[in-house]
Image (cartoon, grey):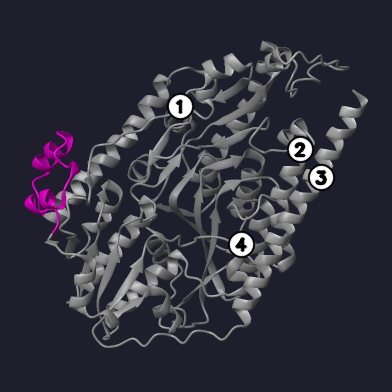
């Protein structure tokens, strides 16, 4: 046995060292490639001719937060706000004749689609045209396509059309958990707070089904209404065709027959027709200076981007989007100290996370000496809404997700698994509830009640914050809280937000309210040093070491998404 133990330790040591070496060379490679890219001669900006078409690539992510590691070495990447501004500039640029968008592989979320759609509608009010091309269309990319003047598909039966109602499935793990001996104790405060229910139930709860069905029905209803208006198709007829399956696994010819596209043409033929040299990428358009240059007025409105899960501390998990009090404070203080910035916009995309971190950030917002308006993007639910409620005004897109006012704690327990593995764990305890967070001790009803009472206090604090900030009676707030999730167009009716509108609408409203006749917009981006970037990459290395060293209990206890009161909405709609 002693020999086997030595061999095991040697193997673990060797694997650790190999992992360290591999990650070191990966990081070194990123630095070398980035540095080479930064120092190498820059590519000349493409000439923008008369009668050019601005080409938008929607298969890439337009960040609303943080820093891309490669951008550290080659600054100048385009974020979502600058993408919107490029459409504005193209609208008045005499060299730009139109816009071309290939919607295949679009990764825009629904809020971004809504905001770009409005921009395209404004663009089309000029004599300029918007051309949309898609080889494969579904609900998500077709809803953007309808904002174009012409929708084009290739005349090929292998191009697929999948326009339908909706389909969503959620796995429930209770029986599997029971089988392997892993249990999850989920303490909800709020009947509709559904996070973690798929670990403790074997089927969807009545409350979750009711909540999600309402949202999915509303999103589908908006889809039908928008397509009907933009394509001038009878709403009832369109709905029947879709629900009867006529547009599921359909062909471009079917869409042409139903007036849902305008032309059958291969992409290369379309490009040849318009002139290959007449297409300019949005990157080249921005690099030429038309967007970034802009007007530089003394009075400014600052934008701070808050995207990702909310954590009390940065857990060093690489470049995964996250929000922490510390990272927020760094950008927030810069905006407050800048005398030219008269007001601050918080652009929030967050499903929530740590209750403590949410409250700390809320307090900073609430006590701001400068006005703060909130622009909700894809989602600001649970902790994301907690933060939002501290703003003076809240804006959201029609299909932004918000609300989910509730609290939950999730405590895994592997007691049965340990028994099945025939492991004997001896424990020493002094003090009642000392083992309440143990992964291997029995979790009692008394333990559950203790944590429930704690979470209930956090929930009441959440309600009080929203009630005070939104000037709502507690009894009215209780009816729309309980973990219920709302779309933006629903939230404005029940008082959780103030207006429907995107990022630019929020900026314009602030400028108007502050009586600023002329102002610039200043984005408060995260300031990353090379040292911080390298430290961010150490997170995955430490995770490998922890797993190899079997430091599971230590790692889980440090995770904000376990044990501690949590305000989180993790589902995709």
Mark 3–mark 2 CB contact (< 8 Å):
no
Residue 2 spot, x, y in % from top left: 92, 26
C-beta proximity under 8 Å, tags 2 and 1: no
Camera-near label (2 vs 4) is: 2
Q: CA distance from mark 2 to mark 4?
A: 49 Å
Q: Nearer the viewer, residue 486 or 258?
A: 258
Whether 481 is drawn above or below 95: the answer is above
Is residue 405 magenta-colored?
no
Q: Position of residue 164 (x, y in %)?
A: 23, 39
Left or right of 457, for residue 114? left
Mark 1 Cα within 10 Å, few/some/many (few <14, many 20+)? few
Q: Mark 1 sits on what residue?
A: 171
Question: Rounded to the nearest whole Å, what is the CA distance between mark 3 and mark 2?
Answer: 11 Å
Residue depth check, mark 3 versus mark 1: number of the one nearer the observer: 3
Residue 338 visible within the image? no
Residue corresponding to mark 4: 369
Which residue carries the number 2 mark? 548
Dot 3 or dot 1, earlier in sequence: 3
Question: In percent of the image, x 15 and y 58: which residue is there?
Answer: 155
């Amino acid at each position: 046995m002693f020999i086997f133990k030595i061999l095991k330790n040697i193997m673990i040591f060797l694997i650790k060292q190999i992992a360290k070496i591999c990650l070191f060379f990966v990081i070194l490679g990123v630095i070398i490639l980035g540095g080479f890219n930064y120092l190498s001669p820059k590519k000349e900006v493409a000439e923008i001719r008369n009668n050019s078409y601005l080409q938008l690539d929607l298969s890439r992510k337009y960040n609303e937060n943080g820093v891309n590691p490669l951008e550290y070495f080659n600054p100048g990447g385009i974020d979502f706000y600058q993408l919107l501004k490029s459409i504005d500039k193209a609208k008045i640029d005499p060299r730009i004749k139109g816009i071309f968008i290939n919607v295949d592989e679009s990764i825009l979320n629904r809020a971004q689609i809504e905001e770009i759609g409005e921009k395209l509608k404004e663009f089309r009010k000029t004599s300029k045209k918007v051309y949309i091309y898609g080889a494969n269309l579904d609900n998500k990319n077709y809803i953007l396509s309808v904002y174009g003047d012409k929708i084009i598909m290739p005349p090929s039966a292998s191009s697929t059309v999948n326009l339908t109602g909706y389909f969503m499935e959620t796995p429930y793990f209770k029986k599997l958990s029971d089988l392997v001996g892993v249990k999850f104790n989920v303490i909800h405060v709020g009947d509709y707070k559904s996070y973690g229910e798929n670990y403790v139930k074997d089927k969807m709860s009545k409350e979750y089904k009711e909540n999600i069905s309402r949202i999915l029905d509303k999103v589908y209803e908006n889809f039908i209404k928008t397509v009907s208006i933009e394509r001038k198709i009878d709403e009832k007829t369109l709905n029947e065709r879709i629900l009867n399956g006529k547009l599921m696994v359909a062909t471009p010819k079917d869409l042409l027959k139903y007036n849902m596209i305008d032309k059958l043409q291969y992409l290369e033929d379309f490009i040849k027709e318009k002139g290959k040299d007449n297409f300019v990428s949005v990157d080249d358009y921005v690099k030429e200076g038309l967007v970034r240059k802009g007007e530089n007025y003394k009075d400014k409105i600052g934008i701070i981007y808050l995207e990702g899960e909310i954590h009390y501390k940065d857990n060093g998990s690489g470049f995964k989007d996250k929000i922490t009090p510390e990272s927020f404070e760094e950008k927030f203080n810069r905006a407050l100290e800048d005398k030219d910035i008269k007001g601050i916009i918080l652009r929030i995309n967050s499903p929530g996370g740590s209750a403590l971190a949410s409250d700390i950030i809320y307090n900073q917002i609430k006590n701001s000496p400068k006005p703060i308006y909130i622009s909700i993007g894809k989602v600001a639910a649970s902790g994301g809404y907690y933060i939002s409620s501290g703003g003076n005004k809240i804006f959201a897109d029609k299909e932004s997700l918000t609300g989910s006012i509730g609290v939950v704690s999730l405590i895994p327990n592997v007691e049965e698994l340990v028994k099945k593995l025939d492991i004997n764990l001896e424990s020493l305890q002094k003090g009642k509830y000392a083992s309440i967070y143990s992964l291997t001790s029995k979790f009692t009803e008394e333990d559950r009640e203790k944590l429930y009472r704690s979470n209930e206090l956090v929930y009441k604090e959440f309600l009080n914050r929203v009630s005070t900030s939104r000037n709502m009676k507690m009894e009215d707030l209780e009816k729309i809280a309980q973990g219920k999730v709302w779309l933006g167009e629903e939230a404005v009716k029940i008082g959780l937000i103030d207006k429907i509108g995107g990022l630019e609408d929020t900026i314009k409203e602030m400028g108007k309210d502050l009586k600023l006749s002329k102002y610039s917009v200043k984005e408060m981006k995260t300031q990353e040093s090379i040292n911080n970037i390298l430290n961010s990459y150490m997170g995955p290395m430490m995770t490998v070491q922890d797993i190899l060293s079997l430091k599971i209990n230590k790692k889980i206890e440090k995770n904000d998404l376990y044990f501690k009161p949590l305000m989180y909405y993790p589902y995709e709609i």
